Structures are given as C-alpha cells and as structure tokens.
C-alpha cells in the first residue's frame, strides 16, 4: 500500500470483491478497514493536490468502492435476517442519497466536455443488419469520454450498476403502491438501458483503450434483469457475452 502500483492494484481488487459480493448477496471478503483506508488516503491526497486530475479520479473510484461495500453489507445482512427492517430502511436511505450525490455533485473536472467523444457515429463501421439489431442508440452525445477521462466512463457504468442494485433492493414499505413500483421499475430500466448504450458505444469506438470492455462487462449482468425479455434483447446480450468470451 506504500506505492502507487500497490494502491492501484488494491482499488482493482476491491472493485472485484464488491462486484462479486453485490451479485451474490454475500459480504465482501476484504474487511471494511481496507475500504476505509483507501477512501481516507485519496481524500487527504485530493486536499493536498486539489488540481490533480489523476487524484480526483482515484478519489471517485475509492468512493465508489466504499459505497458498494456499504450496500453489499446491508443487503447481505437483510438476506441473513441480521438487520431489522427499521435499520435497513434507515441505512438504505442514507446510502441512496450518497450514491446519488456521487453523480450529481461530481467534480466538474471529471465531466470536462473537451474529452467527450463526439465523432463516434462517423467512424463506427456497422452494417445495415447490425443497425437493425441494435437495442439502444450508442451514438447519443455525452455517453463516452476519451483521453484521461475514459476512467470516468467505466466508473459511470459502475455507478449505474450500484444505482440499479440499490433501487432494486428498495424496502417494500417504501414502494407500497402500484404507482411507486412502476416509478421504481422505470428508473431501473432507464439505468439499465444507459448501461447498454455505454457498453455498445465503447465497443464501437475505434480508439477504445486496450481492455476497455473488461471493467464494464460485469454491469451487463445487472442491466439484463431490467430490459425487455424479448428475442431481440436476448440476442443482443448473447452476442455481448460471446464477444467477451472471445476476447478472454
């Protein structure tokens, strides 16, 4: 943990750990202190070097890992029956606000429009058949950041997954009416569709960094649950899974 390489490796492992925990409903293998340490370290570094883009992105990543860890813990406790409904509702509400603020209060430097990919459609080589098979519009402006901010593209997909998981675990008492459940489902479907859009945009991007699809691939598992269950969508997802297997 004393080197930049070690901290980068730890951030990646923490991401893997909480992704597995969220998908399985288990507690993360890594203890809370590791998540706390990473978050505290990058908060201190960001205060000391407030203009460092690298540290701003590292802090955003550490915050994402910490929120994911907190969410996985309360979900695991709910699954085991070791948390009361009242405590679950309270902690879930606090986490939901924190998750939303990660996106709405993001440092403007991490949304610098200069790094938006604006020429994707002009360079994407798609056949007419492939366009007909699309389930989303991957050319919508604002989906994809290039250059040093590609990291934020991957983190945005991760945020969408965490937001989907959080909202899908909304306490029943907070979605009591049919209208409440409908609004909840529409939010989940919107986040899932945006995930698919970004994934497709990255795949079509000729300048994508090496291995760019790897950190966002796991998000498809969450989004599959909240998109239409018809032949077109199933076929699209099967192609993406096959592509990832092909690329290793």
Image (cartoon, rainbow, N blue to C red):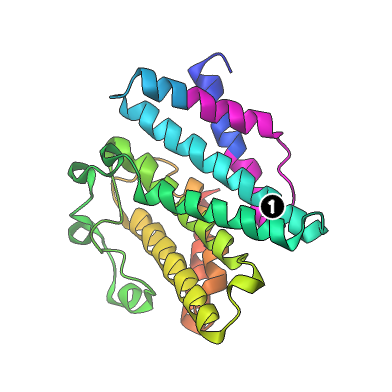
Is any atom of residue 66 visible in this view? yes
* Along the line of sight, the residue nearer the viewer: 240 or 141: 141
Q: In this view, does 108 lie to the left or right of 75?
A: left
Horizontal relation, residue 149 to residue 165: left or right: left
Picture quadrant where residue 47 is located: top left
Name, please, the residue furthest toward the top: 2
Q: Does the magenta stretch include residue 179?
A: no
Where's residue 122, x and y in %?
17, 60
Horizontal side of residue 39 vs 49, given as left or right: right
Q: Is residue 25 magenta?
A: yes
Which quadrant of the figure contains the N terminus? top right
Q: Where is residue 104 in the image (x, y as percent from the top left)?
A: 35, 51
| Residue position marked by numbered label 1 in the rendering | 74
Instruction: Kindly state the secondary structure of the residue where label 1 is placed.
Output: helix
Residue at x 71%, y 43% (from the top left corner): 28
Q: Residue 159 in the image: x percent, y percent?
A: 47, 52
Residue 218 showing in the rendered view:
no
| Residue extent of the magenta highlight | 15-42
Please rate how many residues cluster around mark 1, counting C-alpha atoms within 10 Å: few if below 14, some from 14 to 19, many from 20: many
Q: How many marks?
A: 1
At x 81%, y 54%, the residue is: 82
Front in this rendered view, residue 103 or 211: 103
Q: Which of 185 and 125 is in front in this view?
A: 185
Q: Where is residue 220 in the image (x, y as percent from the top left)?
A: 52, 61
Q: Which residue is drawn at 82% across and 59% down?
A: 81
**Prevailing secondary structure of the magenta residues:** helix
């Amino acid at each position: 943990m004393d080197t930049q390489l070690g901290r980068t490796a730890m951030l990646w492992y923490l991401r893997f750990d909480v992704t597995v925990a969220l998908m399985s409903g288990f507690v993360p293998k890594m203890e809370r202190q590791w998540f706390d340490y990473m978050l505290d370290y990058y908060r201190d570094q960001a205060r000391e070097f407030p203009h460092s883009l690298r540290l701003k992105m590292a802090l955003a990543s550490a915050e994402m890992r910490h929120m994911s860890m907190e969410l996985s813990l309360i979900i695991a406790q709910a699954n085991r029956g070791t948390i009361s409904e009242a405590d679950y509702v309270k902690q879930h509400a606090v986490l939901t606000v924190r998750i939303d603020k990660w996106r709405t209060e993001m440092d403007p430097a991490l949304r610098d429009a200069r790094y938006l990919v604006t020429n994707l459609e002009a360079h994407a080589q798609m056949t007419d058949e492939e366009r007909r098979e699309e389930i989303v519009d991957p050319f919508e402006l604002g989906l994809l950041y290039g250059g040093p901010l590609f990291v934020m593209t991957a983190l945005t997909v991760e945020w969408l997954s965490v937001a989907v998981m959080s909202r899908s675990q909304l306490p029943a008492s907070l979605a009591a009416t049919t209208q409440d459940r409908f609004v909840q489902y529409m939010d989940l479907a919107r986040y899932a569709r945006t995930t698919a859009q970004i994934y497709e945009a990255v795949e079509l991007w000729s300048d994508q960094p090496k291995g760019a699809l790897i950190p966002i691939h796991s998000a498809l598992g969450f989004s599959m649950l909240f998109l239409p269950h018809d032949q077109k969508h199933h076929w699209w997802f099967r192609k993406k899974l096959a592509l990832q297997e092909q690329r290793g």
